[in-house]
Image (cartoon, rainbow, N blue to C red):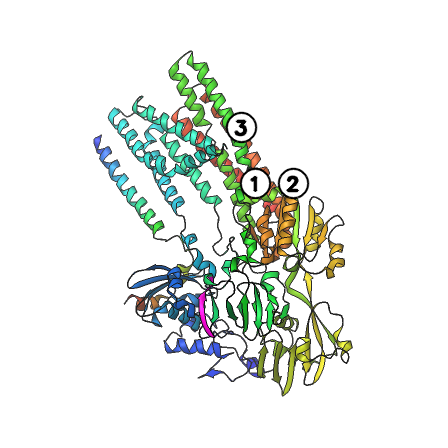
Amino acid sequence: METELNTVKEEIICFHCGDVCPDEQIKTGDKYFCCSGCRTVYEILNENNLCNYYTLDSAPGLKQNTPVSKNKFEYLDDEKIISKLLDYSDGNFSKVTFILPQMHCSSCVWLLELLYKFSSGVTDSKVNFLKKEIYISFKKQEVSLRQVVELLTSIGYEPEINYENIKDKTKRADDKSIYYKIGIAGFVFANIMLLSFPEYLSLNPSDKQLKQFFSYVNVALSLPVLFYCSSGYFISAFQGIRKKIINIDFPLSLGITALYLRSLYEIFINSSPGYLDSFAGLLFLLLLGKLFQNKTYDTLNFERDYKSYFPISVTKIKNGLEKVIPLSDLAKGDRIVVRNNELIPADSILFSGQGNIDYSFVTGESDITIKTCGETVYAGGKHLGQAIELEVIKEVSQSYLTQLWNNNYPKMEERGITSLVNTASKYFTISILVIASLSFIYWAGININTAVNAFTSVLIIACPCAFAMSTPFTLGSTLRIFGKNKFYLKNIFVIELLAAVNAFVFDKTGTITQSGNSNVEYSGGVLSEYEKSLVKSIVKNSTHPLSVKINNYMAEVKNESVLNYKEFPGKGIEGLVDDRLIKIGSDKFVGVNETADEGKIGVKKSSKVFVKIDDEIKGHFAICNDYRNGLSEVISSLKKKYKLFLLSGDNNDEMEQLSGIFPAASELYFNQSPSDKLNFIKKLQSGGNRVLMIGDGLNDAGALLQSDVGISISENVSNFSPACDAILDAGSFKKLSVFIEFAKTSLTIIKVSFAVSFLYNLAGLVVAVQGMLSPLFAAVLMPLSSVSVVVFATVSTNYTAKRKGLI
Amino acid sequence: MSVIAVLICFSLLVALGFLAAFLWAVKSGQFEDKYTPSIRILFDDVKETKKD
């Protein structure tokens, strides 16, 4: 292995990040680095005696390719911003939480938790690896927030600080009450069961007082369950009635109340044991169901809007002076400076400089638009190249793109689907009340005691616990199975919406086309192996999406060391390899002469990257979009049952190809603006359709929010994705139609479990109407029915998933 | 027979202790991050320096 490394001159691995070093220029001692950024990080760690970092994982660092400008974090000196970012602060100590997207291995955890070694002002730092969060406590007097952020940045972990962080912090308060409730209900359930053993075993304690004592202890134990654990059901039932809806919580509350009152009556009046064991067990099981349905994904965020990636500050120019102000203070008419790699925060007019605006964020396309003075640039674009000056013409929230969020979108509950459970529970409740009253009337003439017994027994035994649990367990399992297939739903209600969909709307770029695996084609003068290696050596250094694609295209080619490598953002790259000047980039950058080099240019249709070696233009790489794997299969399986539409922000170049894939009946629309897309969805919905929108970029955001189910597709699910109901990993796109079918199956399973639980209820009712409900019978029947329904729901969901090839 | 009542009181007290421990554990966030501690435990010699 070692000899092999030595024979190939270039194979020097960067000690920090593990990338291949372009040359031997950058080194400290015997360690080589790929860039000065990596070396700086190494030196900082070395100074602080923290080189253990490199022993935990080999080359754990991340490439440091974007040098951070000195005043980038100037805004962190602003008191207003500081107070919004801090979690807690008193006279001495401050606490802050940051998201560090770069965190990726155990070395990161080790290093970040030793932050106090770098600065005495930092007292403690703790990492949550899955959430990629770090919690830092520091002494205000010794170190400022800005210094903490700069420290993190200097060791390669630049915190993600955006507009959303400072706008609202409430989402961080996690709701733990479900765990408290389950803990308490479980505790009470177990203890009441224990104290009810003599009763279960029909032991007749000679000591009557002892029996009483057990009962009283049970009552005391059950109080927190009644008042704390079951509070959610009562509240929800009450809210439902206020909106004139009988939801599932209504018959549940009714059953719980009847069960409890009857137990109190039995214990205090009849001196018999009551049903408190069933009561606590019921609540325990119900709460478990609730916990099961609330599967959340730590690293995913379904609520993101433009705020989550807009910067929190901008550089404003006033009277010739630059000043960093919070984004929220930006007003119409302000003059601002946008530097290389910065986002344009609001619609503006270009005032000076040349704008190379990359809207890939917004549209998902890798094209760069060139803007000159006087032209309008839209918020959301990223500027590449020399700093430009802009005059803001619209406020941040009123810009072309951001105003998409000013609409009122239908909330989950308002999307018109009365959930299956609530529909069923309405009829269920009515029939239970009728049966209970009938049996009361029947017995009232004979024996008023039995009549009351029968009435309450019916309410108790008909308490739809099995019924209420089939939904969370079926949908909860479905949600998990989808998760295993990299289809992440926001919550279980999305499954019901999915099953009801009848129209599919696709976005084009980034959704049905693949950005990662484009077709790269070279045309022009033939490149020899030697020339290929020259080209590869240059593109390897660039992180521009097109360079990366060309680099992947030439994966097999060897590379040489590069001198004088330069990147011209928005134009191209150049460098000296083996004393030959290589230029790679746009036609203008390499100086293509339309007439002279005609044969080498071809038709302008896709992104083109030209290659120039010394003075000769060799040819170009054409990078065209490729349709996603399995697209035609997905379309052909969907077209039988659903209406299909395509909305593209692009021109109709690909019309021909696409109409070959989409069935004749589907409609394809091109040149659609974000609000066109939104309005199209609205139009479909007003025609009575249930619309599933699948898109990726911010330009689909409005449509995703408006649709019944908005699915955001992403190559890497932890990357940015606009607000949606579900996030789909690009690799699972081909399973889309299977997912829809599976959602439908889950709903069928729920219906079957309803039937099963109904049979249990019927059996119980036969006993109950006779007024002969023994505590033991109740204590056995209720958990038995619940558990068997849960088992049925979970097993059948997993079985069908297996048959459909999802697990 | 009353000795049973006393014993039951004791057993309940013990159980309550465990319940309190559980509630405290949830409250102090011990169930929030189930992954990082598994990495952290490997850094034993760092932990020692951290304590002083």
Residue located beneath label 1 in the image: A796
- Tell me if label 3 and label 2 are in contact, CB under 8 Å: no
Q: Which is more foreground, mark 3 or mark 1? A: 3
Tag 3 and tag 2 share a subunit:
yes
Name the quadrant containing residue A652: bottom right
**Observer-nearest of A45 and A52:** A45
Chain bearing mark 1: A
- A204 vs A8: above or below: above
Q: Position of residue A703 (x, y in %)?
A: 60, 51
Please rate how many residues cluster around mark 1, counting C-alpha atoms within 10 Å: few if below 14, some from 14 to 19, many from 20: some
C-alpha span from label 2 to label 1:
32 Å
Tag 2 and tag 1 share a subunit:
yes
Q: Amino acid at mark 2?
A: Gly
Asked if residue A554 lies left or right of residue A399, the reply is: right
| Lower sequence index among marks 3 and 1 | 3
- Tell me if label 3 and label 1 are in contact, CB under 8 Å: no
**Observer-nearest of A64 and A317:** A317
| Lower sequence index among marks 3 and 2 | 3
- A307 vs A439: above or below: below
Residue located beneath label 2 in the image: A688
| Lower sequence index among marks 2 and 1 | 2
- Tell me if label 2 and label 1 are in contact, CB under 8 Å: no
Chain bearing mark 2: A
Residue A126 seen from this side:
no
> At 70% across and 67% down in the image, what residue appears?
A606
Chain bearing mark 3: A
Residue A595 seen from this side:
yes
Q: Amino acid at mark 1?
A: Ser
**Which stretch is magenta?**
A320-327
Residue located beneath label 3 in the image: A427
**Magenta span includes A435:** no
